[in-house]
Structures are given as C-alpha cells and as structure tokens.
Image: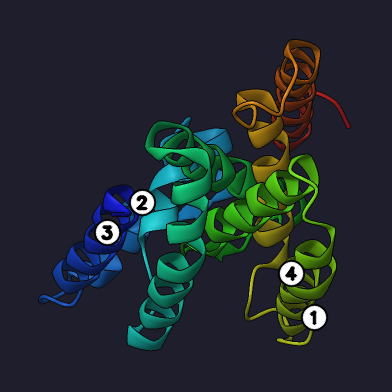
Amino acid sequence: KPIITYILIALNVLIFLYMMIGDNYSKMIEVFAVYKPYIVQRGQIYRLLTGAFLHANIFHLLFNCYALYVIGSQTESFMGKTKYLFIYLFSAISGSLLSITLNQAGVSIGASGAIFGLMGSLLYFGYRVCLGNVITSQIIPLIVLNLIVGFASGGQIDNFAHIGGLIGGILFTMALGVKYKSSRSEMINGWLISLIFITFLVLISFGIIV
C-alpha cells in the first residue's frame, strides 16, 4: 500500500481544513508560504518546504491530492517508501528555489512542484528500466500538457516551481538510484549534479552571484 502517499495527502487535507478555520488562512500564508523577500531577507528558509503543504482553495487541494494519489502511488511502488519521500521533499524544495529565483516577488503555494518532481522521478525510472513506450506515450505528454497549462494560465500557476520540481525529481532519483539498475558512478554523478543545481539556485536567489 502507498502509505507515504496517503500520509502526504492526509497532511495536505488537514492543513487545508485548519486554514479554513477563522482567519487562519491569512495567518498561514503570512507565516509559511513561499515568498522571496521573507526567505532571503529574514532567513525564513523553512518556507521553501512548508509552502508545498498550503493550498489556495478546495479545487487547488483536490486537483493536487488526486494527482498525488495517481502519480505518487506509482512512484512509491517503483522507488520504495524512503526514497519516494526524499524525492518528494527534495522536489518541493528545488521547485520553491527556482520559483524564488525567477518569480521575484510573488507568493507561491501548493504541492504541484513536488508532484512534478514525482513525474520527473517516473521519467528517470522509465529510462533506467527501458520503458521507452511508456515514457513517450504517457509520461512526457503528461509533463508537457501540464507545463502548457501552466504557461497559459497568465501567471496564476507558478510554472517555475513546476520546472524546478521536475528537474529536482529527475536529479535526486538519479542520486538515490533505481534498484538493480543504477551503477555507483551514476548515483555519484546524481549527487554531484543535484548539489550543483541546488547550490546554483541558492547563490542566485540570495543574490550571492548575479
């Protein structure tokens, strides 16, 4: 059973229900949403992860929870529970980092960056186990369609978080490796590239390099 997926869905739902009580919504957004000025200037690094557990409305929540159930269940089955959880969290953070790097002053919330990371994980998994037909007929069209919807939203959807999560999911799955398929050198390369990717985003978003 995809226990980790169920737990992640439950967390998202419980947090959303709490946000709907009184004026908790505005307070939660103020304290936990991905917002560059507070992350960079006030050092509230935790927002890079906590923003992935907040949702704007019931439709936002239901869409992401359904996507998490479908995509997360498969990824958890293929990668195993521990690797799956780390991929999810890493993708959420990498999505948030690319968001604050390119989306300078906007507020970003939602699990979609992490979910795109799971799609990236499935893409890498399919590549390592030679599921060429599945990649070209299912995974890639799903990723492309969702990115097109994001770009067509007129800024309502944070596609930078999606792209960051997607890249993070691919790289961290490469780092953690696919059982019986990944070599040690591939995994080492995955760790190095993941570290370089995250470091590069941090240096740019925090203004250390321009």
> In the visual, does 130 lie left or right of 62?
right
In percent of width and height, residue 2 lies at: 33, 54
Q: Residue at x 64, y 58 (%)?
A: 119
Name which of mark 3 and mark 1 comes first in the sequence: 3
Can residue 100 be seen from the camera position used here? no
Are the residues flagged by discs 2 and 3 in contact, CB closer than 8 Å?
no
The residue wearing badge 4 is: 143
Indicate whether 157 appears above or below 163.
below
Q: Secondary structure at mark 2?
A: helix
The residue wearing badge 1 is: 148
Q: Secondary structure at mark 1?
A: helix
Name which of mark 2 and mark 3 comes first in the sequence: 3
In percent of width and height, residue 163 lies at: 74, 57
Label 4, label 2: how far apart the Cα atoms are: 27 Å
- Which mark is nearer the camera, 2 or 1? 1
| Picture quarter with the C terminus | top right
Residue 129 vs residue 177, the one in the foreground: 129
Name which of mark 4 and mark 2 comes first in the sequence: 2
Are the residues flagged by discs 3 and 1 in contact, CB closer than 8 Å?
no
For badge 4, the amino acid type reads Ile
Q: Residue at x 36, y 51 (%)?
A: 32
- Which mark is nearer the camera, 2 or 3? 3
Name which of mark 2 and mark 1 comes first in the sequence: 2
For badge 1, the amino acid type reads Ile
**Badge 4, how many Cα within 10 Å: few under 14, some, many 20+?**
some
Q: Secondary structure at mark 3?
A: helix
For badge 2, the amino acid type reads Phe
Q: Point out which mark residue 32 bears.
A: 2
Q: Secondary structure at mark 4?
A: helix
